[in-house]
Image (cartoon, helix red, strand yellow):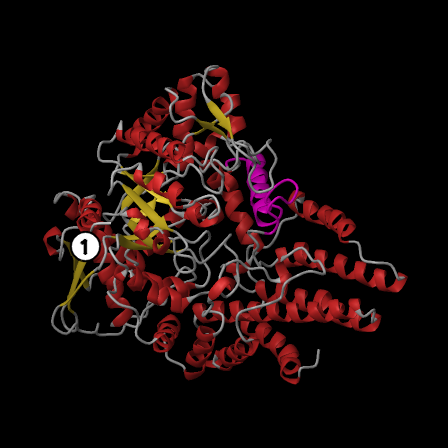
Amino acid sequence: MEAVAVAAAVGVLLLAGAGGAAGDEAREAAAVRALVARLLGPGPAADFSVSVERALAAKPGLDTYSLGGGGAARVRVRGSTGVAAAAGLHRYLRDFCGCHVAWSGSQLRLPRPLPAVPGELTEATPNRYRYYQNVCTQSYSFVWWDWARWEREIDWMALNGINLALAWSGQEAIWQRVYLALGLTQAEINEFFTGPAFLAWGRMGNLHTWDGPLPPSWHIKQLYLQMRSFGMTPVLPAFAGHVPEAVTRVFPQVNVTKMGSWGHFNCSYSCSFLLAPEDPIFPIIGSLFLRELIKEFGTDHIYGADTFNEMQPPSSEPSYLAAATTAVYEAMTAVDTEAVWLLQGWLFQHQPQFWGPAQIRAVLGAVPRGRLLVLDLFAESQPVYTRTASFQGQPFIWCMLHNFGGNHGLFGALEAVNGGPEAARLFPNSTMVGTGMAPEGISQNEVVYSLMAELGWRKDPVPDLAAWVTSFAARRYGVSHPDAGAAWRLLLRSVYNCSGEACRGHNRSPLVRRPSLQMNTSIWYNRSDVFEAWRLLLTSAPSLATSPAFRYDLLDLTRQAVQELVSLYYEEARSAYLSKELASLLRAGGVLAYELLPALDEVLASDSRFLLGSWLEQARAAAVSEAEADFYEQNSRYQLTLWGPEGNILDYANKQLAGLVANYYTPRWRLFLEALVDSVAQGIPFQQHQFDKNVFQLEQAFVLSKQRYPSQPRGDTVDLAKKIFLKYYPRWVAGSW
């Protein structure tokens, strides 16, 4: 590949949306000033002067901020865009004031007087884009949000320098208009859409119908949640080729292919219909949708579409793949001649046996260079750019996926994340134009996202990660503490230093899986580091317990320690079963199911961020009637557990929440251990198939239950964590299970 062609492709993306008109500067500055007031309060906000000046940009398309003042004067924050100004504010709060902005609660104790900035500090991002979201994030984390919660997230995005993000809310309302205009009935449209908690997979063509339909009020509310602020570039959805089956009624001659099933669903809910790229209705549907979408929301010319996400195309012929890709792109450019297609590169990683060099080349070459922007979605673990010659010259964003399903569980690959963006920039003929965070679910493992956000503004890796996590802890808690710093360094070298094939970012702990005798308890770290970090964090509790972030982390680490203990007691119970030692089985199983899990539920109940009641209350609050609230709650329960009507993607979106542990995970474990005890006592083999049938009844009963759960915490996190620690840590040290 010629370097000049690479440079040309990157150049297109650098210029695309390189900053709005000068008239937008005042609007973006006002948005940042409003953010400062929300974040710090009106009094402290008066100590900051914010301006947006396009001319500040170091190079076209590269966000730049400048900091100055402080001390006896106001702190001056200038940015080339609103995002750059917000990121500059965050840099000042982080590095000069020792503050911390987080999902779980921010630490914003400002020193007085405000520290002075020596001279003028100017920083430019090394790449055009800092991307955020995964298509799945919309369903796993955002699904029930109201505007107040969205506003907090947009503030977080701006402070962390995000300037490119999916804006997919409300698209079903637009599709409804299009399909009605094409002649489909309302009943046919209702039949097509999934329920709210599963829309991400409807949007990618994986699912239809499941746990729907969408109430009319859903469409109205979602239209009002779209965002346009701070100079961010919203990525709007586009037509990928999937259509409702009812299109074949309206257009009997239409050329469609019925795709294969997805995710263990049958064709009642999957096997989507894909329009042939040459069918004349393809550009009509694509253009109708995009025109209506732009009329509603405007556009910044970047559109997302995924035709073959986790689905094998009907043909592996390069000519077919090129035609399918061209059809999607031309439907965009028919409406917007400046269109750039944002493509999740997950398909190349997920099905490498199908996507060989010729197939990848067909897709990447079907769109003019610079008009296809690829997300290397899982680059911290399995980068695709290295085996596709930097995506055949198409620009790409190096992304950290990190989390699947919104699972709880301490996890990260900080060494790989730290070095990954620089390695991609230095790759021969690199077409990297940005960094990104693409988790399936948020509000977990915040240290990982803090590092990734910082790397979006760094030209090189953090030189000393141990020092970095120590300062991270000090900012997070508002004070430096030697034991807390030591705890974080232990976590860095253990749970946050995953490497190799083990780095999947998905919690497969026995605690949150349907029990069996074949459960995998292998981990990539030394459990001793987790238990010692737990001890150190508890030791620092007398000094740090007033910090909400500390209490959150202590609970999260206690949860992780209990997760480790569940694995150990499970191994002991399994060993006792295999050797037919009934007394040992009763002892290990009794501790696991009747002591450990209830203790975990009790400590989780001490924090509103770990309550099933809080989770379900979000769903119910999105409704406009009691019947709708019940429907939304059931959607949420299904996602957390069975995922499909028959446990189709069982426990994929597992969470460790008070109420879920008590009424879903614990009954499963008790039923399993009772079955093992009966098996040993009666001298008959354990029947996994029969157990699966029996336990499904428990799982389904939980989903269909109307039981309400507390949405207010009870108990003291520190006391409850200490109680668990004092009971189990000595056993760990002594090795006496």
Q: Secondary structure at mark 1?
A: loop
Dot 1, how many residues are within 10 Å of its Cα: few (below 14), some (14-19), or many (20+)? many
Residue 16's quadrant in the figure?
Answer: top left
Q: How many marks?
A: 1
Q: Is residue 602 among the parts visible in the rendering?
A: yes
Question: Looking at the image, is 282 positioned above or below residue 167?
Answer: above
Q: In the rendering, at what x and y percent does residue 325 appear? A: 36, 34
Q: Residue at x 11, y 72 (%)?
A: 119
Q: Position of residue 503 (x, y in %)?
A: 49, 62
Q: Nearer the viewer, residue 313 or 87?
A: 313
Image vertical order of residue 463 relative to residue 368, above or below: below
Frontmost residue, 284 versus 321? 321
Residue highlighted by disc 1: 62
Q: Work out which quarter of the rendered image holds the C terminus and state it.
A: bottom right
The quadrant in which residue 632 appears is top right
Which residue does the image show at 39% across and 18% down from the upper left? Answer: 181
Q: Give the residues in magenta.
A: 624-651
In percent of width and height, residue 437 lies at 37, 55
- Residue type highlighted by circle 1: Leu
Per the image, is 631 magenta?
Answer: yes
Residue most toward the right? 682
Which is more toward the observer, 676 or 375?
375
In this rendering, position of residue 487 left or right of residue 111: right
**Which residue shows up at 57% across the image and 67% down it?**
559
Is residue 101 at all visible to an observer of this figure?
A: no
**Residue drawn 52% across the image and 32% down it:** 259
Question: Residue 268 placed where, x, y %?
Answer: 60, 31
Is 479 included in the stretch rendered in magenta?
no
